Image (tube, rainbow, N blue to C red):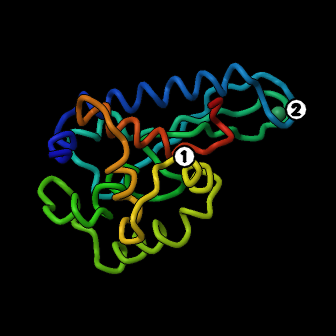
Amino acid sequence: MCHALLQTPAFFTLLRQIDEDLMQAAHQNGCCHCGHPLHRADYPRKPRGCPPAARPDCSTRLSLCCAGCRKRTTPGSVRFLGRRVYLAIILVLRSSRTHGSGTEGLPDVSWVTLKRWRLWWTDTFPATPVGRWLQGRLPPAPDAVVYPERLLQTVQADTDTGRLTALLRLLLPRSDRND
Ligand SMILES: [Zn+2]
């Protein structure tokens, strides 16, 4: 059911707006290295397997550059997960054993990539700052329930849009968060 969102341009516009808000917050904080003002220094991204509905809103990674020390500040993003070439939403839905099985609307991902993603979710992600933070907050789950299922089952909202944006927000780097 979530897959319909991948054909919905408005969903990706919303994700971009969330990223714009994150960028504004980082902009107001100024450079974390020297305190000077930051300037926009976005860079192009061409995510692999990007749904056509996502292309207009997922072609740029918002970023900032310091007017003083020239160092880059790249705010957290609900669209892009670090340097990964696939969109974060694709990584979540495609890695899921329940949501990823019906691949309608999802890009083809090689078995090797899928295996690597699932290993990341089970072995790497729980040890990241975000994973450790979540560990103390998510309700206990049976051992068989692993990420990203655990997130997909836990996050509640009235709509798929609300549920998936909330889930993507949970994956934001902790350093960009106030809660
Ligand atoms: Zn600086």
Whole-angstrom CA distance, mark 2 to mark 1, is 34 Å
Give how far across and how far down residue 150 sits, in percent.
38, 56
Q: Between 172 and 75, which is closer to the camera in this rendering?
A: 172
Tags 2 and 1 in contact by the CB under 8 Å rule?
A: no
Looking at the rendered structure, the kind of residue marked 1 is: Arg
Give how far across and how far down residue 69 sits, in percent.
84, 36
Instruction: Describe residue 45's horizontal placement relative to residue 152 as left or right.
Output: right
Instruction: Describe residue 133's horizontal placement relative to residue 30 as left or right.
Output: left
Mark 1: C-beta under 8 Å from nearest atom of ligand 1? no
Kindly identify the residue that appears in the image at 14 percent across and 46 percent down: 1
Q: Secondary structure at mark 2?
A: loop
Q: Earlier in the sequence, mark 2 or mark 1?
A: 2
Q: Nearer the viewer, mark 2 or mark 1?
A: 1
Tell me if I can see residue 107 in this picture.
no
Using the image, tell me which numbered label, if any, was put on residue 137. Answer: 1
Mark 2: C-beta under 8 Å from nearest atom of ligand 1? yes
Mark 1, residues whose alpha carbon is within 10 Å: few (<14), some, or many (≥20)? few
**Residue 110 position (above or below residue 36):** below
Kindly identify the residue that appears in the image at 48 percent across and 49 percent down: 138
For this orientation, the residue located farthest to the bottom is 112
Mark 2 = which residue? Answer: 34
Mark 2, residues whose alpha carbon is within 10 Å: few (<14), some, or many (≥20)? few
Tell me if I can see residue 110 in this picture.
yes
Give how far across and how far down residue 143 sits, in percent.
42, 70
Q: Between 73 and 138, which is closer to the camera in this rendering?
A: 138
Give how far across and how far down residue 2 sits, in percent.
20, 45
Instruction: Describe residue 159's horizontal placement relative to residue 137 as left or right.
Output: left
